Image: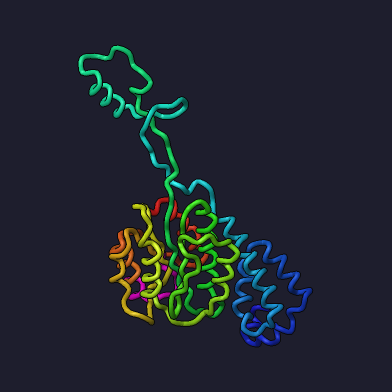
């Protein structure tokens, strides 16, 4: 069906009867990429009803796959020193310093409040995902953008995060302070047109605005692109607006685009990760998110 769609989309459109859509539903339930690819090839020629069904199956497939990738234990612990409590750790060095300061002539009796305890609290994450959704034949960039956004949404359910996608211009998919269901995030990305232009500058401008007013030191952005911009100006000057700008270099780009990606990560004080296929992107994203600071 996919091979035929590349030659004659209308012939495949006629084949997509209710029975075949049920079969696609079973494929989507397994979390594969067949249904999303078919959706981006076919969405321009399907009627509203069948396009809506195929989009729902695509969303289901991407969410299923993202659940496999997203895992627990991403949140970094922050050691907070305070009064010692039962069943908590204590800071031996800090406790000794405090005892020597309090009792310079000797320790009469060691009391509980002489011990400095350590409470491990989860460090909040506040980040922005900036996704290249510029055109490709089967919507690989859009599929990758939707999958990456879903992985981030599952992993940061208790945190503030924003999602921006860009092609010819930037689109705010989810504001960093917005409370948006993951299904709505998926639908907004799936509705983007896969156009050929790549405007990294506009995407990074919007990302900088999203994190500008967050009152925390622990804020960062992850950019997914091949670096080969053909719309807007050279984006490297925008790195000064980011405390941490990590870059995942998508496959299929040019060598000069790779240099742009490396420079963006270096100037943004973040990490540079290159992937050879789109299948590697979700795990590369998770690797950065484990310690984005």
Task: Please provide percent x and percent y for residue 181.
Answer: 58, 61
Task: Please provide percent x and percent y for residue 143.
Answer: 55, 70
Give the quadrant of residue 63.
Answer: bottom right
**Position above or below: 279 against 166:** above
Give the quadrant of residue 176.
Answer: bottom left
Horizontal relation, residue 107 to residue 152: left or right: left
Task: Please provide percent x and percent y for residue 182.
Answer: 57, 61
What residue sits 37% from the left and 67% below the top?
209
Horizontal relation, residue 236 to residue 128: left or right: left
Quarter placement of the N terminus = bottom right
Q: Is residue 180 magenta?
A: no
**Position above or below: 140 against 6:** above
Q: Looking at the image, which is closer to me, 259 or 159?
A: 159
| Residue at the extreme top of the image, as rendered | 108
Horizontal relation, residue 192 to residue 169: left or right: right
Q: Which residues are magenta?
A: 248-259
């Amino acid at each position: 069906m996919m091979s035929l769609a590349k030659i004659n989309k209308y012939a495949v459109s006629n084949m997509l009867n209710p029975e075949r859509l049920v079969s696609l539903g079973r494929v989507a339930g397994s979390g594969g990429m067949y249904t999303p690819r078919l959706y981006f090839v076919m969405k321009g020629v399907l009627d509203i009803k069948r396009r809506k069904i195929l989009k729902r199956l695509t969303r289901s497939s991407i969410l299923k796959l993202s659940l496999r990738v997203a895992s627990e234990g991403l949140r970094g612990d922050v050691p907070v020193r305070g009064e010692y409590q039962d069943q908590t750790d204590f800071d031996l060095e800090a406790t000794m310093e405090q005892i020597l300061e309090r009792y310079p002539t000797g320790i009469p009796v060691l009391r509980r409040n002489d011990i400095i305890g350590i409470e491990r609290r989860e460090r909040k994450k506040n980040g922005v995902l900036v996704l290249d959704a510029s055109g490709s034949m089967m919507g690989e960039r859009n599929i990758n953008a939707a999958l990456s956004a879903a992985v981030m949404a599952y992993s940061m359910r208790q945190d503030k995060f924003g999602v921006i996608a860009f092609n010819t211009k930037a689109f705010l998919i989810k504001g960093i302070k917005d409370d948006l269901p993951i299904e709505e995030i998926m639908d907004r990305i799936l509705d983007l047109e896969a156009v050929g232009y790549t405007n990294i500058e506009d995407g990074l401008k919007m990302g900088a605005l999203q994190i500008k007013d967050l009152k925390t030191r622990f804020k960062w952005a992850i950019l997914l692109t091949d670096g080969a911009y053909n719309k807007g100006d050279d984006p490297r000057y925008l790195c000064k607006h980011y405390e941490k700008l990590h870059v995942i270099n998508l496959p299929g780009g040019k060598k000069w685009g790779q240099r742009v990606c490396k420079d963006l990560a270096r100037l943004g004080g973040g990490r540079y990760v290159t992937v050879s296929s789109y299948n590697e992107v979700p795990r590369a994203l998770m690797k950065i998110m484990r310690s984005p600071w």
